[in-house]
Amino acid sequence: MRPENYPEGQQRSFIEEARRRQIIASAAEVISEVGYANASLARIAERAGISKGVISYHFDGKDELMSQVVIQLFVSGAEFMGPFVEAAVADGARAILHAYLSSNLQFIDNNRSYVAAVSDIVLNLRGPDGTLRFDTPDGDREMIAPLVSALAEGQRTGEFGDFDPTVLARLIRDSIDGVANRAVRQPDFDMRHYRTHLIQMYDAVTRKDDKR
């Protein structure tokens, strides 16, 4: 169905959501080029081909826009990874782990400039109390929760060996986040080669002792 065929309220919502995503994408492009400190609303508006007033209509200032840039990256990442992980469910926990690693790294490789922008925001955006907006224990737990659950399920079914699922989930996330930073700094970084070795490493780590 084309947008003009939606009822008026739905059409307005569709158009507003498209505009929000356009502004978020423009913000990410500007940040990746000039850095967080120099990414003014004026520059972002110019990149999007709109006025600053349009940004103010959709976002309550620069801080909210920056927050939404970060959130949208995680939403887009989940949307990209979801089908791969879901397709692996029937083949068990190991297949899920492989799909999680492979699709996450592929998403990073496909979106290096966006990842660079988000990394810059995460290191700079602060809340009212002066602490970093996205550096929170709750955020860390929420990020690794699905992976912890998948690892624990693999242990329950006997597919995985003995390890602490939470510790291993954090190690996996650190491996992924670390390579994201490296991919941003090194345009010629071979993500496919890294992905192959990372999967092999965590495949070995999760196996039972008698199968290593």
Image (spheres, rainbow, N blue to C red):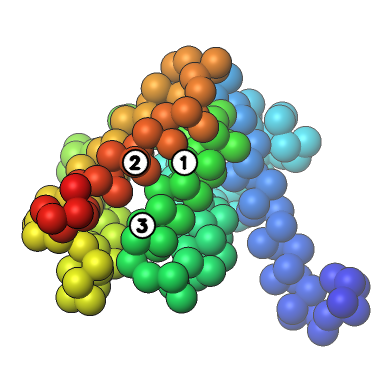
Residue displayed at 69% across by 47% down: 22
Q: Amino acid at mark 2?
A: Gln
Q: Which tag, 3 or 2, sits closer to the chain's start?
A: 3
Q: Give the image location of residue 185, x and y in percent.
A: 45, 17
**What number is the disc on residue 196?**
none
Q: Nearer the viewer, residue 25 or 166?
A: 166
**Quick check: 211 left or right of 122?**
left
Q: Tell me if residue 170 can be seen.
A: no
Residue displayed at 64% across by 51% down: 21
- From what the image shows, is residue 32 above or below residue 195? above
Q: Nearer the viewer, mark 3 or mark 2?
A: 2
* Labelled pair 3, 2 in contact (Cβ < 8 Å): no
Q: Give the image location of residue 10, x and y in percent.
A: 74, 78
Hey, which residue is sitting farthest bottom in the picture? 7
User: Count of labels shown?
Assistant: 3
Q: Nearer the viewer, residue 104 or 88?
A: 88
Q: Which tag, 1 or 2, sits closer to the chain's start?
A: 1
Residue displayed at 11% across by 53% down: 209
SS label for mark 2: helix
Residue identified by numbered label 1: 105
Q: Give the image location of residue 35, x and y in percent.
A: 48, 21
- From what the image shows, is residue 99 above or below residue 49? below
Q: Amino acid at mark 1?
A: Leu
Residue identified by numbered label 2: 200
SS label for mark 1: helix
Q: Give the image location of residue 192, x and y in percent.
A: 51, 32
**Quick check: 12 left or right of 142?**
right
Q: Dividing the image into 4 quarters, which one contains the N terminus?
A: bottom right
